[in-house]
């Protein structure tokens, strides 16, 4: 009976939640092989390239905390729609813009919209999915991201090669509009008991931070390094392939797709491991594998060897599909969920910003190979923090239910 209820829930969420999630994942992934090269065409300064690549992530950082207020004011579905609109318009405008400051500003604004969408989606699934199946449900969402990450770079590389690099921003616009259609038509606000986002009383952000200071310090630090590793590897592969190995945009798109293919194949393993053994059993091996693969990037000599590194990174990342969202949902309590998830997302987005900036700043100051070493260190650091300093949230959550 429980299995039947779980199947019905997944079917009910398919068109309202998972389909729009895969569309927006493809939309952002079409930018992955192109945006670093697009930035390289505008400037040869690695530090400026790093700022361009980090601008959207920095916008997410700024948009994270206000999202809790927007959700309280407008509800989950409406916050998703607002976020998609704010992400869409500036990104499409990039098709016509060539000024570096304007590009940075438009990516920044788009990132604010991305924050609204991401956190409201996270809040939605945290409310409707029970702890016992949360790992698999969010792991499936992580798999959706990965499928998008497999399809998106192929589309982005092809569109960029055939129609010019700026044309990928129009492709992003088409996919985002499709996402909005599915959210608007199929998501019902009543699917989630939105009052559970806040409980009977709405605690202040300050009170939530005071009550969760220790766990945010340990788990939050681990998440920063984890997200820095993920984003850093995504930036490193195109830049290393283009600047060190001399590969073209279409080849780089295929290399990224190879990693995404492995990522998309094994993502369900993460959810099973999280729900059966614990969240840490998925997180720690994942980042050990990714950090090792990033170190091996220094030994690559051509498209084949870089493709093998990309595949290893993809396999390692698959083992952590949905882990950061699951841990955040586990740690959040109903009476302060929106505030906690906003801060949790803020912490993760700081890692994304760090991934792009670390690569750019270190490459500018030294050489791009030292950026590889820095991102590798972040991966091993993430694995160590979650292994030794972060409590296992599966057992903790079960005790409180």
Image (cartoon, rainbow, N blue to C red):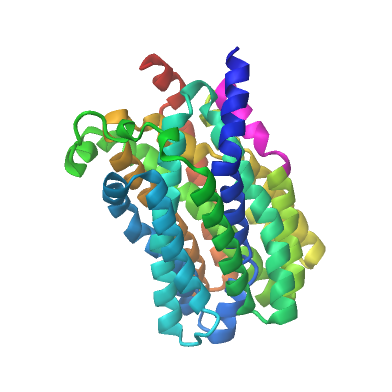
- Residue nearest the viewer, comparing 104 with 310: 104
Magenta segment main secondary structure: helix
In x, y percent, where is residue 131? 47, 24
Quadrant where the C terminus sits is: top left
Give the extent of the magenta segment: 265-276
State the residue lying farthest toward the front. 185
The tally of labels here is 0
Residue 9 lies, with reference to residue 309, above or below; the image says above
State the residue lying farthest toward the top. 1
Say if residue 284 shows up in the picture.
no
Q: Quadrant of residue 204?
A: top left
Give the left or right position of residue 98, taking residue 317 as reference: left
Asked if residue 270 is among those painted magenta in the image, a careful observer would answer yes
Quadrant where the N terminus sits is: top right
In the image, what residue occupies the spot 55% across and 79% down? 39
Residue 112 lies, with reference to residue 6, above or below; the image says below
In the image, what residue occupies the spot 63% across and 77% down? 167
In x, y percent, where is residue 358? 47, 64
């Amino acid at each position: 009976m429980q299995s039947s209820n779980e199947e019905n829930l997944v079917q009910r969420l398919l068109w309202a939640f998972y389909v729009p999630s895969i569309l927006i994942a493809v939309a952002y992934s079409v930018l992955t092989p192109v945006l670093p090269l697009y930035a390289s065409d505008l400037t040869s300064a690695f530090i400026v390239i790093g700022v361009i690549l980090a601008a959207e992530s920095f916008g997410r950082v700024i948009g994270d905390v206000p999202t809790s207020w927007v959700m309280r004011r407008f509800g989950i579905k409406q916050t998703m729609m607002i976020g998609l609109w704010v992400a869409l318009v500036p990104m499409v405008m990039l098709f016509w813009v060539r000024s570096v400051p304007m590009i940075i500003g438009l990516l920044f604004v788009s990132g604010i919209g991305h924050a609204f969408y991401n956190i409201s989606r996270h809040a939605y699934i945290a409310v409707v999915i029970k702890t016992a199946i949360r790992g698999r449900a969010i792991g499936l969402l992580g798999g959706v991201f990965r499928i998008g990450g497999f399809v998106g770079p192929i589309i982005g590389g092809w569109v960029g090669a055939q129609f010019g690099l700026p044309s990928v921003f129009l492709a992003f616009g088409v996919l985002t509009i499709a996402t909005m259609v599915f959210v608007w038509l199929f998501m019902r606000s009543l699917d989630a008991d939105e009052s559970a986002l806040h409980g009977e009383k709405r605690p202040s952000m300050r009170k939530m931070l005071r009550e969760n200071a220790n766990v945010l310090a340990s788990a939050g630090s681990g998440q920063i390094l984890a997200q820095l590793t993920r984003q850093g590897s995504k930036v490193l592969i195109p830049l290393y392939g283009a600047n060190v190995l001399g590969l073209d945009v279409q080849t780089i798109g295929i290399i990224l797709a190879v990693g995404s293919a492995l990522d998309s194949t094994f993502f369900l393993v993460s959810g099973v491991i999280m729900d059966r053994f614990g969240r840490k059993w998925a997180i720690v091996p994942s980042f050990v594998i990714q950090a090792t693969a990033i170190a091996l990037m220094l030994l690559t000599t051509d498209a084949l060897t870089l493709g093998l590194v990309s595949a290893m990174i993809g396999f390692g990342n698959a083992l952590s599909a949905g882990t950061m969202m699951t841990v955040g949902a586990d740690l959040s309590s109903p009476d302060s969920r929106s505030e906690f998830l906003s801060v949790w997302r803020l912490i993760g987005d700081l890692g994304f910003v760090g991934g792009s900036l670390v690569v750019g700043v270190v490459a500018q100051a030294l050489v791009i190979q030292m950026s590889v070493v820095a991102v590798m260190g972040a991966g091993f650091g993430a694995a160590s923090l979650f292994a030794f300093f972060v409590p296992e949230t599966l057992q903790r959550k079960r005790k409180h239910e």
